[in-house]
Amino acid sequence: MPHTISDRTIGRLSLYRRLLTGLLREGTRFIHSQELASLAGVTAAQVRRDIMNIGYSGNPNRGYDTAELVRSIGDFMDDPAGQQVALIGVGNLGRAMLAYFQGRRPRLSIVAAFDNDPAKCGRVIQGCRCYSMGELEDVVRRERITVGVITVPANEAQRVANRLVAAGVTGIINYAPVPLWAPVPVHVEDIDMTTSLEKAAYFARTMH
Amino acid sequence: MPHTISDRTIGRLSLYRRLLTGLLREGTRFIHSQELASLAGVTAAQVRRDIMNIGYSGNPNRGYDTAELVRSIGDFMDDPAGQQVALIGVGNLGRAMLAYFQGRRPRLSIVAAFDNDPAKCGRVIQGCRCYSMGELEDVVRRERITVGVITVPANEAQRVANRLVAAGVTGIINYAPVPLWAPVPVHVEDIDMTTSLEKAAYFARTMH
DNA sequence: TGTTGTGAATCTCTTCACAGCT
DNA sequence: AGCTGTGAAGAGATTCACAACA
């Protein structure tokens, strides 16, 4: 088991777990690499390699034990103590994220939202307490938040990122259409919706 | 200039263009690969390679002509006749996308939205006409829509994708947390917010 | 002198192919 | 007989390093 696991592999493991959790609810006890691969849209060799990387082993003729595999992925990916997430910017996109994530993974939850709009502060939106921007550092420290989701306009994104990092956040998901720059070792995941649309348009065209 | 250009390169070109367009407004006439690279968060060699791939050439001591480079990227990526986009699912996420894209790129616009909710149909939301799901095929054909953005719940996503593809769409952006399967040559771009959050949480932890 | 354009080297990720196991 | 686990090969993407040039 290599000490470092690639970004791509982590992404696929997250997907495998979600698919496996669904299968488990339907009563699937064992699964072959080929089946999981076709659900995930990858090759069977890729699935076996990914699972090998986290140190789990299947059974050469029954395949992988669904429940055990889900647990192994969790052991590998999740912080046993849980991780807290903050969301900054409660616009349409922010609300969509809050609605989507609430109660989805017990060990990873959005515990605080922040916005400039006084009408939103102090309220509970989609089950999540909304604070004013001024309270950001205090709440991040108090709630031991390690991941920040940035859904503010482009011109505010870098400033918000700086404040998050200064307050101790080490993982950022950036939905603003500008690349962020983080000084210290911080994982930044840029999700650029503009680029996605332009890419899809380009390949839609070259697909013939 | 290679006949096929990678997904990654197209993504970066889209970003370069956005950055360059901003610089152009501020009056930057020429730019070196090093400056563009640092704005985009990549290496200078990467920028030069990407630009080489689209067949544009800079000047060995002034660098690249900003306006010409923007134009070259457009010549390479954009359909001269324009491309129309449909958005399916006008929830929080759908509204966020509509609000964000309206009027941003003249040659690539969301011309129709679709939703099941009768209260939304027939109205104009964020400047975009909203139709009922029953009208999907007719509108896609009539408006010559080639790209679809799926922002519906997971259990409806594959069905929506099938209908889009049958109506002639060749590029899909999928925000539902399930991998989509497209039968014929269609470019599918899965944007999985769950996976992004789990990835960011994992790397936030290993970043120490 | 300082930058671009690019072949070659390097690095990273994926797939092949088959030994080993049940 | 059929599947997993994995070394080795292959593909693809990035970076190096330097010739060519203004």
Image (tube, coloured by chain):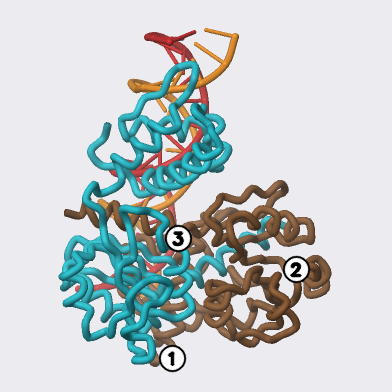
Chain colours: A brown, B cyan, C orange, D red
Mark 2 neighbour density, 10 Å: few (under 14) some (14–19) many (20 or more): some
Three-letter amino acid code at the position of disc 3: Met
In the image, is residue B55 above or below residue B160?
A: above
Horizontal and vertical percent position of residue B152: 38, 80
Q: Nearer the viewer, residue B109 or A204?
A: B109
Distance of label 2 from label 1 (alpha carbons):
41 Å
Q: CA distance from mark 3 to mark 1?
A: 33 Å
Amino acid type indicated by mark 1: Arg
Q: Are marks 3 and 2 in contact (CB under 8 Å)?
A: no
Crowd rating for badge 1 (residues with CA inside 10 Å; few <14, some 14–19, many 20+): few
Tell me the number on the disc at residue A25.
1
Q: Which residue is mark 3?
A: A193
Badge 1 marks a residue whose secondary structure is helix
Q: Is residue B93 left or right of residue B89?
A: right
Say above or below: B41 vs B199. Answer: above
Quadrant location of the C terminus of chain A?
bottom left
Image location of residue A4, percent across then percent down: 58, 53
Disc 3 to disc 2, how far (Cα)? 25 Å
Residue at (41, 23) in percent of width and height:
B58
Within 10 angstroms of label 3, few (less than 14), some, or many (20 or more) residues?
some
Of labels 3 and 2, earlier in sequence is 2
For numbered disc 2, what is the local secondary structure?
helix
**Amino acid type of the residue tagged 2 in the rendering:** Met
Q: Can see residue B169? A: yes
Badge number at residue A133 = 2
C11 vs A155, left or right, is left
Q: Are marks 3 and 1 on the same chain?
A: yes
Q: Nearer the viewer, mark 3 or mark 1?
A: 3
Q: Residue at x 21, y 82 (%)?
A: B135
Quarter holding the N terminus of chain A?
Answer: bottom right
